[in-house]
Amino acid sequence: MSNGTGEALVALESQVAFQEHTIEQLNEALISQQQQIDVLRVELRLLSEKFGELDDRVEHSGSAKDEKPPHY
């Protein structure tokens, strides 16, 4: 094996190692983002349920805009 081929092989091994490191970092970022999405989905579901409950209360109690203020 000539010196040029050895250097090329070392360069390729270095490039592969760098790519493997980059892929691992991207994978960790993807896992973190998915965890954040899961948390946000739960929070959105809870907020949606609370909003629905408030909406039901408003519908059952009548419209506040139709009521006269207490001083009338």
Image (cartoon, grey):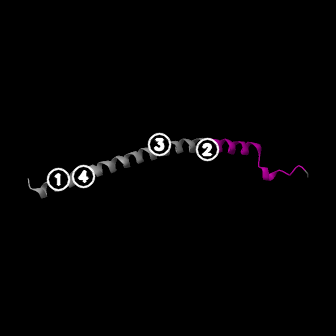
Of labels 4 and 3, earlier in sequence is 4
Q: Secondary structure at mark 4?
A: helix
Q: Is residue 46 magenta?
A: no
Which comes before the other along the chain, label 1 or label 3?
1
Reading the image, the residue beneath label 4 is 14
Q: Is residue 59 magenta?
A: yes
Alpha carbon separation for disc pair 4 and 2? 49 Å
- Element carrying mark 3: helix
Q: Say which residue appears at 45% left-offset and 47% top-offset.
A: 33
Number of residues whose C-alpha sits closer than 10 Å to that of mark 2, classed few (under 14), some (14–19) or many (20 or more): few
Total of numbered circles in the picture? 4
Tag 3 residue: 35
| Secondary structure of the residue carrying numbered label 1 | helix
Q: How far apart in space, not on screen, are marks 4 and 3 (Cα)?
A: 32 Å
Q: Position of residue 14 (x, y in %)?
A: 24, 52
| Left or right: where 30 falls relative to 51 | left
Residue 8 or residue 63, whichever sits in front: 8
Q: Quadrant of residue 45?
A: top right
| Circle nearer the N terminus (1, 4) | 1
Q: Position of residue 22 (x, y in %)?
A: 33, 51
- Along the line of sight, the residue nearer the viewer: 51 or 5: 5
Q: In the rendered structure, which segment of residues is drawn in magenta?
A: 48-70
The residue that disc 2 covers is 47
Residue ID for mark 1: 9
Left or right of 17 on screen, residue 68: right
* Residue extending farthest left: 1
Seen at 49% across and 45% down, the residue is 36
The secondary structure type at the circle numbered 2 is: helix
Q: Amino acid at mark 2?
A: Leu
Decide if residue 53 is on the left or right side of residue 30: right
Closer to the N terminus: mark 4 or mark 2?
4
